[in-house]
């Protein structure tokens, strides 16, 4: 899983590809084991390499990668709040405000009695919570089609009260879960766009948020390379770099070159 993400990002740098590939792409990096994990056929060998994705594939970009699904899940369950916060903070650079005191937490329902949407409605009944959840929940709902280890799913799994047969030799042939309610990956973004699934959501991000993704990548490159956050005095230089790379779709290596040649890098 980690190898896919590292190879994917490295390829964007090496080939100077647009940061829009972080949102969605027509390729990823797989070997046999990861391809089997994703349900992609025809991949042999253990070498991680670039694989062209089927146009109908849900994969593409970093949000659909198993490594991201894993770090945005709570153990064995997913949470739209954690995944939505990841998209806002790490991809868009627009972290939501911390929850107000007494907001409580989202408790997973392993029995499948309620959906995660029904649970989140409790948080949206208070305006102080709803203001942030209108931003957080939509990307989290879009990513609900991936389970805690990145498998695509259409139904939730109910695990409480389901026991595995005691047969060590055949333990992988038995499931310690039942299929629960259907997964609903639809939603409405804060700007009013209605999406039906992860594909719709990624297309909307590419159309509306490419510049914001590029800005966030640029901020992270500056912080990583200089050891300091972007300050108000750096704003003019940041805008210059974005304008210089805009026509080419904000290529990643070009952004790196622009940062290295900038006053922010040379004078710190």
Image (spheres, rainbow, N blue to C red):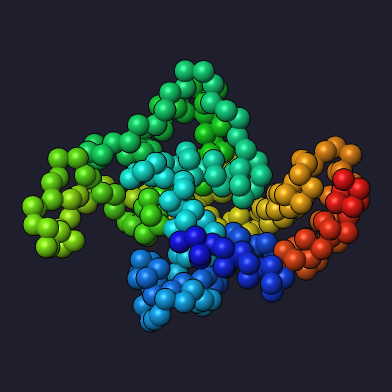
Regarding residue 52, the answer to whether it shows in the image is yes
How far across and how far down the image is residue 99, in percent?
A: 53, 26
> Is residue 31 shown above or below 168?
below
Residue 239 visible in the shown view: no
Image check: 239 left or right of 150? Answer: right
Q: Can you say which quadrant of the picture contains the C terminus?
A: top right
- Residue drawn at point x = 51 percent, y = 65 percent: 4
Residue located at (33% from left, 36% from top): 108
Is 147 above or below relative to 16? above
Q: Nearer the viewer, residue 153 or 150?
A: 150
Does residue 5 sit above or below 139 in this rendering?
A: below
Q: Residue at x 51, y 43 (%)?
A: 84
User: How many numbered discs, if any?
Assistant: 0
Q: Indicate left or right for 252 with 61 as reference.
A: right
Screen quadrant of the N terminus? bottom left
Residue at point 52%, 29% (across, down): 130
Residue 155: x, y in percent? 29, 53
Q: Work out which residue is located at the far top of the displayed protein and give it.
A: 102
Give x and y (percent) for residue 16.
Answer: 72, 70
x, y percent for residue 146: 40, 54
Closer to the camera, 109 or 2?
2
């Amino acid at each position: 899983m980690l190898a896919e993400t590292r190879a994917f990002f490295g390829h964007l740098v090496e080939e100077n590809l647009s940061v829009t590939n972080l949102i969605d792409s027509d390729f990823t990096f797989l070997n046999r084991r990861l391809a089997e994990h994703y349900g992609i056929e025809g991949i042999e060998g253990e070498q991680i390499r670039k694989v062209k994705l089927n146009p109908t594939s849900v994969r593409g970009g970093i949000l659909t990668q198993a490594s991201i699904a894993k770090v945005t899940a709570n153990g064995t369950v997913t949470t739209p709040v954690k995944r939505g916060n990841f998209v806002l903070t790490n991809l868009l650079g627009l972290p939501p405000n911390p929850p107000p005191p007494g907001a409580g937490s989202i408790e997973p329902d392993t029995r499948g009695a309620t959906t995660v949407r029904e649970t989140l409605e409790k948080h949206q009944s208070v305006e102080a919570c709803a203001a942030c959840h209108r931003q957080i929940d939509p990307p989290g709902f879009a990513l609900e089609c991936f389970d805690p280890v990145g498998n695509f799913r259409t139904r939730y799994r109910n695990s409480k009260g389901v026991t595995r047969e005691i047969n060590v030799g055949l333990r992988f042939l038995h499931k310690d879960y039942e299929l629960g309610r259907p997964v609903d990956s639809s939603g409405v973004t804060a700007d009013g766009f209605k999406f039906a699934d992860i594909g719709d959501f990624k297309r909307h991000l590419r159309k509306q948020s490419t510049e914001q993704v590029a800005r966030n990548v640029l901020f992270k490159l500056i912080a990583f390379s200089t050891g300091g956050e972007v300050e108000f005095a750096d704003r003019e230089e940041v805008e210059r770099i974005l304008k210089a790379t805009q026509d080419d779709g904000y290529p990643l290596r070009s952004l790196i070159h622009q940062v290295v040649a900038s006053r922010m890098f040379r004078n710190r």
